Amino acid sequence: MGEFVLPKFQFPALQVAGSQEQFPIRRVFCVGRNYSEHAREMGHDPDREPPFFFMKPNDAIVPASGQIPYPPLTSDLHHEVELVIAIGLGGKNIKKEAALDHVWGYSVGVDLTRRDLQAKAKSMGRPWDWAKGFDASGPCASIHPVTQTGHPSKGRIWLEVNGELRQEGDLSQQIWSVPEIVAHASQAVQLKPGDLIFTGTPAGVGSVNSGDRLRGGIEGVAQFEFEIL
Ligand code: MN
Protein backbone atom coordinates (compact mmCIF):
# COMPACT_ATOMS: atom_id res chain seq x y z
CA MET A 1 0.00 0.00 0.00
CA GLY A 2 2.82 2.46 0.77
CA GLU A 3 3.07 5.69 2.70
CA PHE A 4 0.57 8.54 2.36
CA VAL A 5 1.86 11.40 0.21
CA LEU A 6 0.25 13.98 2.52
CA PRO A 7 0.16 14.11 6.29
CA LYS A 8 -2.88 12.10 7.42
CA PHE A 9 -5.67 14.53 8.32
CA GLN A 10 -7.73 14.27 11.44
CA PHE A 11 -10.92 12.26 11.30
CA PRO A 12 -13.93 14.44 12.19
CA ALA A 13 -15.42 13.44 15.53
CA LEU A 14 -17.76 14.64 18.26
CA GLN A 15 -17.37 14.18 21.97
CA VAL A 16 -19.49 11.52 23.62
CA ALA A 17 -21.47 13.21 26.40
CA GLY A 18 -20.19 12.58 29.89
CA SER A 19 -17.08 10.71 28.76
CA GLN A 20 -13.60 11.15 27.33
CA GLU A 21 -14.57 9.11 24.28
CA GLN A 22 -15.28 10.40 20.79
CA PHE A 23 -17.79 9.45 18.10
CA PRO A 24 -16.13 9.31 14.64
CA ILE A 25 -18.13 10.90 11.84
CA ARG A 26 -18.27 9.16 8.47
CA ARG A 27 -21.02 10.82 6.41
CA VAL A 28 -23.78 13.33 7.12
CA PHE A 29 -27.25 12.83 5.64
CA CYS A 30 -29.97 15.42 6.15
CA VAL A 31 -33.75 15.08 5.72
CA GLY A 32 -35.23 17.98 3.78
CA ARG A 33 -38.72 18.63 5.16
CA ASN A 34 -39.92 16.72 8.17
CA TYR A 35 -42.29 19.04 10.04
CA SER A 36 -45.52 20.21 8.39
CA GLU A 37 -45.30 23.79 9.68
CA HIS A 38 -41.78 24.19 8.30
CA ALA A 39 -42.78 22.68 4.93
CA ARG A 40 -45.61 25.25 4.80
CA GLU A 41 -43.37 28.19 5.75
CA MET A 42 -41.05 27.17 2.87
CA GLY A 43 -44.01 27.16 0.48
CA HIS A 44 -44.55 23.39 0.18
CA ASP A 45 -47.46 21.05 0.65
CA PRO A 46 -46.78 19.04 3.81
CA ASP A 47 -48.31 15.89 2.37
CA ARG A 48 -46.46 12.75 3.29
CA GLU A 49 -44.38 12.44 0.16
CA PRO A 50 -41.36 10.14 0.66
CA PRO A 51 -38.53 11.80 2.63
CA PHE A 52 -35.71 13.29 0.57
CA PHE A 53 -32.11 13.69 1.60
CA PHE A 54 -29.15 15.95 0.97
CA MET A 55 -25.65 15.79 2.44
CA LYS A 56 -23.01 17.81 4.20
CA PRO A 57 -19.32 16.88 4.19
CA ASN A 58 -18.32 15.18 7.43
CA ASP A 59 -15.88 17.96 8.35
CA ALA A 60 -18.77 20.45 8.26
CA ILE A 61 -19.63 19.00 11.68
CA VAL A 62 -18.11 21.07 14.47
CA PRO A 63 -18.88 21.22 18.19
CA ALA A 64 -21.88 23.49 18.84
CA SER A 65 -20.01 25.62 21.35
CA GLY A 66 -17.71 28.60 21.39
CA GLN A 67 -17.70 30.54 18.14
CA ILE A 68 -18.93 29.49 14.69
CA PRO A 69 -17.74 31.60 11.72
CA TYR A 70 -20.24 33.53 9.59
CA PRO A 71 -19.70 31.92 6.15
CA PRO A 72 -18.85 33.72 2.91
CA LEU A 73 -21.17 34.19 -0.12
CA THR A 74 -24.33 34.87 1.87
CA SER A 75 -26.29 37.66 3.47
CA ASP A 76 -29.07 35.35 4.67
CA LEU A 77 -27.65 32.67 6.98
CA HIS A 78 -30.50 30.63 8.51
CA HIS A 79 -30.67 28.43 11.61
CA GLU A 80 -32.45 25.05 11.52
CA VAL A 81 -32.40 23.15 14.82
CA GLU A 82 -32.65 19.38 14.36
CA LEU A 83 -32.57 16.01 16.11
CA VAL A 84 -29.43 14.17 14.97
CA ILE A 85 -29.25 10.37 14.75
CA ALA A 86 -25.82 8.75 15.24
CA ILE A 87 -25.58 5.39 13.46
CA GLY A 88 -23.60 2.70 15.30
CA LEU A 89 -24.43 -0.35 13.23
CA GLY A 90 -24.50 -0.23 9.45
CA GLY A 91 -26.81 -1.98 7.05
CA LYS A 92 -28.81 -1.74 3.87
CA ASN A 93 -32.54 -2.23 3.34
CA ILE A 94 -33.01 -2.03 7.10
CA LYS A 95 -36.55 -2.86 8.18
CA LYS A 96 -38.40 -0.15 10.10
CA GLU A 97 -38.98 -2.62 12.93
CA ALA A 98 -35.23 -3.25 13.31
CA ALA A 99 -34.03 0.30 12.61
CA LEU A 100 -33.53 1.40 16.21
CA ASP A 101 -30.98 -1.40 16.72
CA HIS A 102 -28.73 0.54 14.30
CA VAL A 103 -28.79 3.77 16.34
CA TRP A 104 -25.87 4.39 18.71
CA GLY A 105 -27.07 7.71 20.06
CA TYR A 106 -28.65 11.09 19.50
CA SER A 107 -27.76 14.75 19.58
CA VAL A 108 -29.05 18.16 18.63
CA GLY A 109 -27.49 20.01 15.72
CA VAL A 110 -28.03 23.12 13.63
CA ASP A 111 -28.34 22.74 9.86
CA LEU A 112 -26.90 26.16 8.99
CA THR A 113 -28.15 27.19 5.56
CA ARG A 114 -27.16 29.94 3.12
CA ARG A 115 -30.85 30.55 2.33
CA ASP A 116 -30.17 33.03 -0.48
CA LEU A 117 -27.96 30.49 -2.28
CA GLN A 118 -30.53 27.77 -1.68
CA ALA A 119 -33.35 29.88 -3.14
CA LYS A 120 -31.24 30.61 -6.21
CA ALA A 121 -30.28 26.91 -6.59
CA LYS A 122 -33.94 25.89 -6.33
CA SER A 123 -35.02 28.42 -8.93
CA MET A 124 -32.32 27.27 -11.35
CA GLY A 125 -32.72 23.54 -10.69
CA ARG A 126 -29.16 23.39 -9.36
CA PRO A 127 -27.83 21.28 -6.45
CA TRP A 128 -28.04 22.54 -2.85
CA ASP A 129 -24.46 21.73 -1.88
CA TRP A 130 -23.19 25.31 -1.71
CA ALA A 131 -26.24 26.30 0.35
CA LYS A 132 -25.88 23.46 2.84
CA GLY A 133 -22.38 22.03 2.82
CA PHE A 134 -20.02 24.89 3.65
CA ASP A 135 -17.37 24.92 6.38
CA ALA A 136 -18.80 24.61 9.90
CA SER A 137 -22.35 24.33 8.50
CA GLY A 138 -23.28 21.59 10.97
CA PRO A 139 -22.63 22.66 14.57
CA CYS A 140 -23.63 19.69 16.72
CA ALA A 141 -23.74 19.02 20.46
CA SER A 142 -22.05 15.99 22.03
CA ILE A 143 -23.39 12.59 21.06
CA HIS A 144 -25.57 11.09 23.79
CA PRO A 145 -25.66 7.28 23.81
CA VAL A 146 -29.03 5.53 23.65
CA THR A 147 -28.30 4.21 27.14
CA GLN A 148 -28.75 7.85 28.35
CA THR A 149 -31.55 9.07 26.08
CA GLY A 150 -33.54 6.03 25.05
CA HIS A 151 -35.10 6.50 21.60
CA PRO A 152 -36.85 9.87 21.76
CA SER A 153 -40.13 10.06 19.80
CA LYS A 154 -41.44 13.13 21.61
CA GLY A 155 -39.96 16.08 23.45
CA ARG A 156 -39.63 19.84 22.98
CA ILE A 157 -37.17 21.01 20.32
CA TRP A 158 -36.30 24.70 20.43
CA LEU A 159 -33.83 27.38 19.40
CA GLU A 160 -33.43 30.94 20.60
CA VAL A 161 -31.33 33.80 19.24
CA ASN A 162 -30.07 36.37 21.76
CA GLY A 163 -32.60 35.07 24.26
CA GLU A 164 -35.57 35.36 21.88
CA LEU A 165 -37.41 32.12 21.07
CA ARG A 166 -37.33 31.54 17.30
CA GLN A 167 -38.07 27.85 16.78
CA GLU A 168 -40.22 25.60 18.91
CA GLY A 169 -41.79 22.26 18.17
CA ASP A 170 -42.02 18.71 19.39
CA LEU A 171 -40.36 15.59 18.01
CA SER A 172 -43.83 14.02 17.88
CA GLN A 173 -44.60 16.45 15.01
CA GLN A 174 -42.05 14.83 12.73
CA ILE A 175 -43.63 13.61 9.50
CA TRP A 176 -41.14 10.72 9.34
CA SER A 177 -40.06 8.99 12.57
CA VAL A 178 -36.50 7.93 13.40
CA PRO A 179 -37.10 4.27 12.41
CA GLU A 180 -38.70 5.35 9.13
CA ILE A 181 -35.85 7.75 8.32
CA VAL A 182 -33.20 5.07 9.00
CA ALA A 183 -35.14 2.55 6.91
CA HIS A 184 -35.55 4.99 3.99
CA ALA A 185 -31.91 6.13 4.02
CA SER A 186 -30.71 2.52 4.03
CA GLN A 187 -32.64 1.83 0.84
CA ALA A 188 -30.57 4.45 -0.98
CA VAL A 189 -27.15 3.75 0.53
CA GLN A 190 -25.60 1.18 2.79
CA LEU A 191 -25.52 2.95 6.15
CA LYS A 192 -22.24 2.64 8.00
CA PRO A 193 -21.05 3.11 11.58
CA GLY A 194 -20.29 6.78 12.16
CA ASP A 195 -22.95 8.13 9.80
CA LEU A 196 -25.06 11.01 11.14
CA ILE A 197 -28.60 11.82 10.03
CA PHE A 198 -30.05 15.31 10.60
CA THR A 199 -33.81 14.74 10.80
CA GLY A 200 -35.30 18.08 9.74
CA THR A 201 -36.33 21.28 11.49
CA PRO A 202 -39.54 22.64 13.01
CA ALA A 203 -41.03 25.97 11.91
CA GLY A 204 -39.47 29.33 12.72
CA VAL A 205 -36.28 29.30 10.69
CA GLY A 206 -34.70 32.73 10.24
CA SER A 207 -31.56 34.80 9.78
CA VAL A 208 -28.64 35.17 12.11
CA ASN A 209 -25.79 37.66 12.04
CA SER A 210 -22.30 38.04 13.42
CA GLY A 211 -22.42 38.52 17.17
CA ASP A 212 -25.67 36.59 17.62
CA ARG A 213 -25.82 33.99 20.38
CA LEU A 214 -27.72 30.80 19.57
CA ARG A 215 -29.06 28.46 22.23
CA GLY A 216 -31.19 25.41 21.69
CA GLY A 217 -31.91 21.89 22.59
CA ILE A 218 -34.14 18.88 22.67
CA GLU A 219 -35.87 17.84 25.88
CA GLY A 220 -34.29 14.66 27.19
CA VAL A 221 -31.52 14.64 24.58
CA ALA A 222 -29.05 17.54 24.57
CA GLN A 223 -28.53 21.32 24.52
CA PHE A 224 -26.06 23.71 22.92
CA GLU A 225 -24.99 27.33 22.97
CA PHE A 226 -22.66 29.14 20.56
CA GLU A 227 -21.95 32.52 19.05
CA ILE A 228 -21.76 33.47 15.38
CA LEU A 229 -18.37 35.11 14.83
MN1 MN B 1 -32.55 21.11 7.68
Image (cartoon, rainbow, N blue to C red):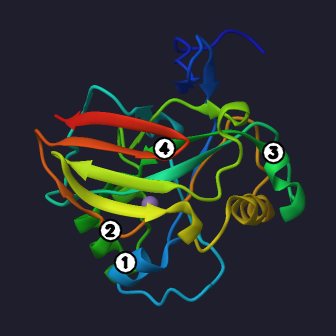
For the residue labelled by badge 3, is the local secondary structure a helix, a strand or a loop?
helix
Q: Residue at x 56, y 47 (%)?
A: 84
Q: Residue 209: x, y in percent?
A: 13, 49
Q: Amino acid at mark 4?
A: Val
Closer to the eye: label 3 or 1: 3
Tell me the SS state at disc 2. helix
Decide: is 190 above or below 2. Answer: below
Q: Residues within 10 Å of mark 3 (few under 14, many from 20)?
A: many
Q: Which sits earlier in the primary sequence, circle 4 or circle 1?
A: 4
Q: CA distance from mark 4 to mark 1?
A: 27 Å
Q: Which mark is residue 118?
A: 2
Residue 95 visible? The answer is: no
Q: Which residue is mark 3?
A: 102
Q: Residue at x 56, y 18 (%)?
A: 18
* Label 4 close to label 2 by CB (< 8 Å): no
Depth check, mark 3 against mark 2: the one in front is 3
**Residue 101 in the image: x percent, y percent?**
84, 45
Q: Residue 129: where, in percent of width, then height?
A: 42, 58
Q: Residues within 10 Å of mark 4 (few under 14, many from 20)?
A: many
Tag 2: Cα neighbours inside 10 Å, few (<14), some, or many (≥20)? some
Dot 4 and dot 3 residues touching (CB under 8 Å): no
How far apart marks 4 and 3 lie (CA) works out to 18 Å
Q: Residue at x 41, y 78 (%)?
A: 37
Amino acid type of the residue that numbered disc 1 sits on in the rendered structure: Lys
Give residue 144's quadrant in the image. Answer: top right
Mark 4 or 3: in front is 4
Q: Residue at x 52, y 18 (%)?
A: 9
Please indicate, yes or no, whether residue 63 appears anywhere in the rendered image.
Answer: yes
Q: Which residue is mark 1?
A: 122
In terms of sequence position, does the residue under pointer 3 or pointer 2 come before the other? 3
What's the mark number on residue 108? 4
